[in-house]
Image (spheres, grey):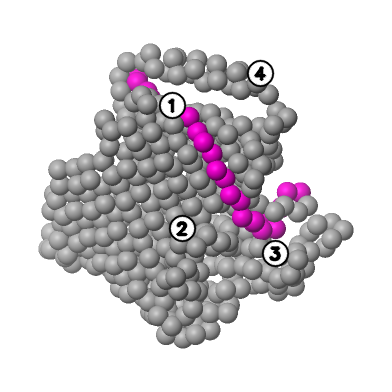
Amino acid sequence: MKKYLLLLFLLFSININAQFDNVLNNGAMLDGGLGISMIDGNPYYTFRFRPEIAIGNFGAGLDLNLEFDSNGNLRTENFLTTSDYLSIIRYLRWGQKHDPVYARVGALDYATLGYGNIMYLYNNSPSYDARTIGLVFDVDMDTWGVETGYANLAKAGVLGIRSYVRPLKFTTLGKIPVIGGMTVGLSYVTDVDKRAGYIDGYLDDSTKTFIPTDNRGNIQIASADLGFPIFQTSVTSLELYYTYTKILDFGSGSAVGALFNFDFTGVSLRVKFERTWNGKRYIPSYFDALYEIDRFNYDDQSKIVNSKVRVLDNATMDDANGWYGGLMLDVMSLFRVQGSYQRLDKRPNTGRLHLAGEVDPMGMPFVVRAGYDKTNIASEAELFTLDERSLIYAEVGYKPWPFMIVSLVYQWTFTPIRGAENVILGYERQEKIEPRVSFVMPLQF
């Protein structure tokens, strides 16, 4: 075991020295470290290597995470499929979201399509033990544009597209305030994973294969939207929008909202506020942060299927209207916070919370990072109770030197339950506690 750790540490040090000798800083970072991780009470020695590079519009990141037990055996849950090995490449990207051209291959962290009425803060890899490679490709040509997202290039999964046009910009009316920048969009998102429509069934114990007895097929959602930029300056902007969404073979809903942006001398503020009107058998923002976990879970003890489509099919209360609010604040990169909350008026278990924040002031010897998602909240008393509807990451660290962070990391996450041929039958909770030593240095090109 000691030989493994010494070898990894030497390799890590060699990488630091080789990368740090370059000459032009472009905001890229080398991030990696060693630690001891407690996973569900069992100790593992961990090695992390997460460099990121950025050259002009191009960016790339790796994510190698090795975990060894006390006997020196590699924990293999991260390396069961070809997709697991490919996902060591965390991402390759060109540009940034909302640039004229934006492309990303790899992990999709909190992806949003359009105004978020179908896909909002979607995460294609909420479990580190079941990472996937996705694709996003967006084009904005001022008069028209396209947004796309595909969750899993290795097999069938969530696939979405939104096309939009600013029709008056083809004419002289495009210079008129508000209506001149009007946007008309159409979206279509589907989940072609065969488990997306499972409502009931049983597990064949001899083959460890799930046999569906009630399958609604692929989930398909279509929508239309209208956007009106009320004003836009170099500092601030306000946009109002309307969306109508239909889940094919199920229900429909609509929403009216506002997007407000403010950027001035290092302070950035983003605010989203929305009112939704939801009919029977309809869930707004169906593909959310925990969709990959909620899509399908089979409890072999109770013989019960818990799936997102089952929740959708049982959403029979009409006029389940609701409010949504979201905020993101960045103050001169000293600290960044974002959060959102949605709750339907009359329908129970519909609350959704997203929180994330980072405090990493330049020149200060500490760092705090945290992220938290929870779905199906019945009451505000449940907001911060950890259970099968929760996902959390938290790190508190001290910097003895600018390039080193000694931290404690806590994760409440999930690990897949696999059947025949590594098919995921569901997820179970996983708790990780890791004292960690990380090295973070600027890369130069």
Front-lying residue, 245 or 384: 384
Where are the magenta residues, as a range? 421-445
Q: Secondary structure at mark 4?
A: helix
Q: Between label 2 and label 3, give the one nearer the viewer.
A: 2
Label 2 packing within 10 angstroms: few (<14), some (14-19), many (20+): many
Cα separation, mark 2 vs mark 3, equals 22 Å
* Mark 1 vs 4, N-terminal side: 4
Cβ atoms under marks 3 and 1 closer than 8 Å: no
Q: Is residue 213 left or right of residue 40?
A: right
The amino acid on which the numbered mark 1 sits, given as a three-letter code, is: Phe
Read off the residue under disc 3.
298
Q: Amino acid at mark 4?
A: Lys
Nearest to the eye among marks 4 and 2: give it: 4
Please say if 403 is above or below 59: above
| Element carrying mark 3 | strand
- What label sits on residue 373 in the rendered view? 2
- Residue 363 in view, yes or no: yes
- The image quadrant of residue 56 is top left
Gap in Å between the C-alphas at discs 1 and 2? 28 Å
Residue at 84% x, 60% y: name it. 205
Q: Nearer the viewer, mark 3 or mark 4?
A: 4
What x and y, as percent, mark residue 25?
A: 30, 23
Q: Which residue is mark 4?
A: 3
Q: Quadrant of the C terminus?
A: top left
Question: For residue 439, which numbered disc appears in the image?
Answer: 1
Query: As rendered, which of 225 and 421 lies closer to the eye?
Result: 421
Q: Is residue 187 left or right of residue 89?
A: left
Disc 2 residue type? Asp
Ranked by sequence position, the earlier of labels 3 and 4 is 4
